[in-house]
Amino acid sequence: MIGFLENQIQLLEQQIYTIDDQEANRILQLMTSVVGIGSQSAQAVLIATNGFKDFENEKQVAKFFGVCPCDHQSGSSVYGKGRIAKSGVPYVRAILYVAAHSAIRFNHACQDLYKRLKAKGKSHKVAIM
């Protein structure tokens, strides 16, 4: 019974991750060409955004996933520590967070950006997002 269920899971995963659209395949190839983003991460992002068809720019995508940093300020003299917004799709935000950790380890451009932001005094989560 367990073997049968495992085969069914594999068949369903193959059906889910099969994309027939040429534009979606092109976007998927571009996303997986970035060091740190694997095929399943790219497919989850592609599915959640409907192939980026509903967005006009990258700021809207960042807001949709909740990965844009937000400031916490009260009045003119009290500034809180910056953190990521908790709006958006939590499953995909978690996938992107793990992909960012991988990118910091293996992608030199991402690693340099992370170090530069940390040197400016940004917190770990704000710098990684």
Image (cartoon, rainbow, N blue to C red):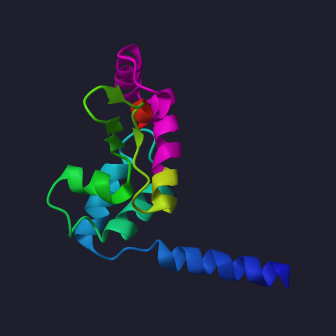
Question: Can residue 39 be seen at all in this image of the molecule?
Answer: no
Q: Nearer the viewer, residue 48 or 85?
A: 85
Magenta-colored stretch includes residue 24: no
**Quadrant of residue 83 in the image?**
top left
Bounds of the magenta segment: 96-125
Q: Nearer the viewer, residue 125 or 32?
A: 125
Residue 26: give x, y in percent of width and height. 26, 60
Q: What secondary structure characterizes most of the magenta part?
A: helix
Question: Can residue 10 be seen at all in this image of the molecule?
Answer: yes
Residue at the spot 39% in from the left edge and 61% down from the top edge: 88
Q: Is residue 59 left or right of residue 18?
A: left
Q: Is residue 20 left or right of residue 7?
A: left
**Quadrant of residue 87 in the image?**
bottom left
Look at the image and tell me in which quarter the C terminus lies. top left
Residue at the spot 74% in from the left edge and 76% down from the top edge: 6
Residue 77: give x, y in percent of width and height. 29, 25
Determine whether 93 is above or below 50 in the image. above
Look at the image and tell me in which quarter the N terminus lies. bottom right
Residue at the spot 19% in from the left edge and 63% down from the top edge: 55
Q: Is residue 22 left or right of residue 110?
A: left
Residue found farthest to the right? 1
Magenta-colored stretch includes residue 105: yes
